[in-house]
Amino acid sequence: MTAGRTAGRVALVTGGGGGIGSAVARRLAEEGAAVAVVDRDATAEAVSAGIRATGGHAAPFLCDLSDESAVTDMVKEVTGTLGDITDVCCVAGSIRRGTVTDLSLDSWRGTLADNVDSVFLVCRAVIPRMEQAGRGRIVTVASGWGLRAGEKAAAYCTAKAGVVMLTQAMALDHSPAGIRVNCVAPGDTRTPMLAREAQQLGQSEADFLAEAADRPLGRIGTPEDIAAAVAFLAGPEADFITGTVLTVDGGGTV
Ligand SMILES: NC(=O)c1ccc[n+]([C@@H]2O[C@H](COP(=O)([O-])OP(=O)(O)OC[C@H]3O[C@@H](n4cnc5c(N)ncnc54)[C@H](O)[C@@H]3O)[C@@H](O)[C@H]2O)c1
């Protein structure tokens, strides 16, 4: 139905091996984009192979997105393999639950590195070519907790608020060059991240999921719910939208 919508595009999806990132990668590939599935582990290869098995165009790229030189090399490799990057979806992120007094400095820094440094480094590497081309689309993934604090997640809330503000700062600076920069702020979404959170809090996964579903629409999100919003903001229907934060959370932040 949507095939061809992003034909001719090259989309770089960070965290492409994860729950939400893999749904974004599949969705953009279905719409006709060549997709660079970027992650720090072998999940990138599995997601990429799955897309190719269904006739899509995708290639895996292994990269620690918090490592400056690794990101520079990866962006060069993606461009050399698939062509100029037209769309960037910054989905990679991680969570370490805890209050300020629970968190080690390493946990704090690791959370900021995975969630914020990754966006900074990838965008810094990609934007100059987009500016030369006079167009580009960037979609970041923050969280409802980047807009409103949640308990026992001090580093994560700080990091996601940083992603929101980085998105808006980039929108101000780079929209005049034709680059739209927007953010999706998901609520709880069924991915491996939720299982890790339950474990970190010492809760059963079932209890954690039941609590997470307590929101106006009465369920947690699916990766496809979030991918649809990312695809919208990266697509032509959003051509007059930049610097926005779209919450996709079943009303959780209301
Ligand atoms: N699942 C939720 O409930 C939820 C809610 C709000 C926001 N989010 C955000 O959505 C995004 C995707 O999360 P998810 O739920 O799919 O989790 P996930 O754990 O399934 O996927 C995250 C992916 O990011 C990758 N990643 C993290 N740091 C990286 C790094 N430094 N280099 C390379 N890859 C790295 C991981 O390897 C993983 O594949 C994250 O930014 C997360 O914070 C998730």
Image (cartoon, helix red, strand yellow):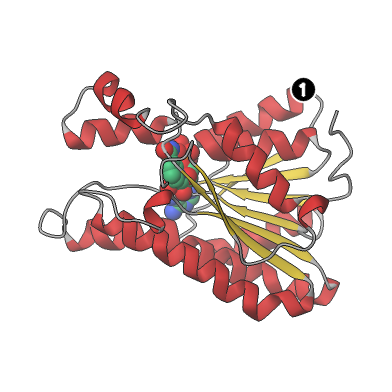
Is 183 located above or below residue 173 in the figure? above
Kindly tell me whether mark 1's CB lies below 8 Å from ligand 1.
Answer: no
> Going by the image, does 75 lie left or right of 96?
right
Which one is nearer the viewer's eye here, 59 or 179?
179
User: Residue 171: where, in percent of width, then height?
Assistant: 64, 72
The number of numbered badges drawn on the structure is 1
Q: Residues within 10 Å of mark 1 (few under 14, many from 20)?
A: few
Q: Quadrant of residue 2?
A: top right
Label 1 sits on what residue type? Thr
> Going by the image, does 215 lie left or right of 227?
left
The residue depicted at 27 percent of the width and 48 percent of the height is: 96
Q: Quadrant of residue 183?
A: bottom right
> Going by the image, does 206 lie left or right of 203?
right
Is 214 located above or below residue 158 in the figure? above
In the rendered image, the residue lying farthest to the top is 206
The residue depicted at 71 percent of the width and 35 percent of the height is: 27
Quarter of the rendered image showing ligand 1: top left
User: Residue 250: where, in percent of width, then height?
Assistant: 49, 36
Is 30 located above or below residue 33 in the figure? above
Helix or strand or loop: what does disc 1 sit on? loop
Q: Does residue 69 show up? A: no
The residue depicted at 73 percent of the width and 56 percent of the height is: 87
Where is the N terminus found, in terms of image quarters? top right
Q: Does residue 241 show up? A: yes
Q: Which residue is mark 1?
A: 54
Is 8 located above or below residue 208 in the figure? below
User: Residue 104: where, in percent of width, then height?
Assistant: 16, 58
In the rendered image, the residue lying farthest to the left is 101
Q: Quadrant of residue 20?
A: top right
The residue depicted at 24 percent of the width and 57 percent of the height is: 154
> Going by the image, does 1 lie left or right of 58?
right
